[in-house]
Amino acid sequence: MNVDPKTLQTLQTLRIAERFAQLTPAQRRAVYEKIRSEGLAPGHFPIVPRESELAARCPLSYAQARQWFLWQLAPESTAYHILGASRLRGPLDLQALRQSFDALAARHESLRTVFRADAEGRAEQCILPAGEPGEPGVSVVDLRELAGDQREARAYEEARRASDTPFDLGAAPPWRVAVIRLEEELHLLVVVMHHIVSDGWSMQLCVESFWAEYRARVEHAPRTLAAPAVQYADYAQWQRHWMEAGEAQRQLDYWTRQLGDTHPVLQLPADRPRRADGIYRAARHAFELPAALLHALRERAREAGATSFMALLAGFQVLLHRCTGLEDVRVGVPIANRQRLESEGIVGFFVNTQVLCSRLEGRMALDAALASARDAALGAQAHQDLPFEQLVEALQPERTLGQSPLFQVLFNHQREERPAPRQVAGLALDDCALGQGEAQFELTLSVTERADGRASLVFGYAEELFEAGTVARWAGYYLAILAAMVEWPRQALGEVVLGDAAERETLRGWEYNEAGYEDARPVHELIERRVVLQPDEPAVVFGDVILSYAELNARANR
């Protein structure tokens, strides 16, 4: 039998990966160093199924370990709940819906996983068999007996209840489904997952798989979706083996050089005092990036050897610099973290967060800010595997309750590769925005570049900190900065005109003072007068040092 060279190479790589997984930690470190010396990396190895003894109980990934830690600190928090809701118009087959969610859980181990501590206190993933009674079911709430004007309000309440009810990570797999019936052929479908088992990519994967399963059941068509070859727990093991062998230290060295020893805190000017616990309700301000501006921004980025992501990030960093005056601007940026092909079809918490830093000052040109964002993003891309949790542990920034370490604002960029299904088996589907629960950060900018050439933008923010009008102004500032990046790339950051004519007129009004002051003189002349009248009286006190007016004036005139 003849085997083509590519297939043979794949089989050989798979065997090496399987052997690498079976080595002791010391042996893996030795192999890692050998492979690195030859210009390769174990990260290129495929993910292989874990050993049989880890089939039901296995270690957490690094990202899961941080979620477990945060959940133990605040088990009642809902900040890490992922919510999706759709309005369904048409005949709904509840049995097919339930069976489709059961099939989804059978296919993906993450949806059958609970999290418990072992005898030594270390958290583990405990994977339940498919069909286990402890798996989440589909709850149905029937509101048809209510008056029409009451149904919508009650449906919203029920949906928020599903989203705002905390998960017990050790009791049952942390996800739930609610079907709220408003009319015979009008339902609200609500799906809530905890971040420890899911992320944005996973939610999209679940939506597509669920509706494919539902369509097949309703139309009595063959069901062709198979379980992925590897599961999230296999990835968690693969990640730990690779990182612990030496890759974590290599990437950590890069991030240490990038971020240094001091970690400035970015505090936006708030409309109301900050709370000590940092827990705030989330609100959102949605706005659009016009297609013409997005197209021009892409062209400007291309000329600079950058991407639209880098240009949009640079604009956000300039906005933060202008709002705070901070020159070392650090922004958290989530990445899908699915470099391996086999990870694309797995439900689980893969997303990693990087800290992208730009050093800005008012005289810097906009194109220099874009170049800074580009360089930071390219460097981060080459070192994207280090879990954020390990970076925090290594750098040990000063920790404050309710404040994210290393960065305080988030920039989330996505491309809409394909629109979500709108018609399935006689059902018309419409996305339904139910609002937010808790804010993860004081400010988050989410950008989705859509297939129609436009971009949807959302500022998510802490409602108790910022007025809606304040955030709306920031949205206007951001668009003005992006427009300036396109039209005047050599313009200094500090010279970009922000705000509309009415806002600028208000600011000019604040400058005008109708009050009159007799004998108004500059401060230095007032001090010189005191030198004549009271030369020996205290003028300045700093700790134990006291200077008289005469001494202060003498120093000023040197």
Image (spheres, rainbow, N blue to C red):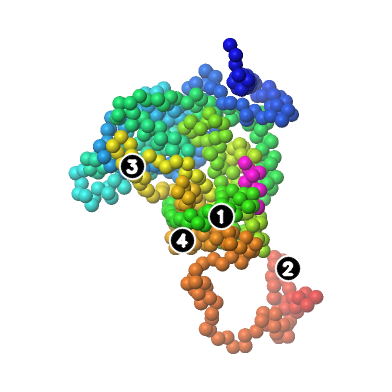
- Residue carrying label 2: 545
Q: Name which residue type carries label 2.
A: Val
Q: Nearer the viewer, residue 355 or 478?
A: 478
| First reached walking from the N terminus: tag 3 or tag 1 | 1
Q: Can residue 408 be seen from the camera position used here?
A: no
| First reached walking from the N terminus: tag 4 or tag 3 | 3
| First reached walking from the N terminus: tag 1 or tag 4 | 1
Q: Please identify, in this view, whether the residue under mark 2 or under mark 3 is nearer the observer.
A: 3
Most extreme residue toward the top is 1
Q: Name which residue type carries label 1.
A: Leu
- Identify the residue shown where x is 35% and y is 41%: 422
- Residue carrying label 4: 472
Q: Name which residue type carries label 4.
A: Ala
Q: Name which residue type carries label 3.
A: Leu
Most extreme residue toward the bottom is 518
Q: Are there few (<14), some (14-19), or many (20+) residues within 10 Å of tag 2?
A: few
- Identify the residue shown where x is 51% and y is 32%: 344
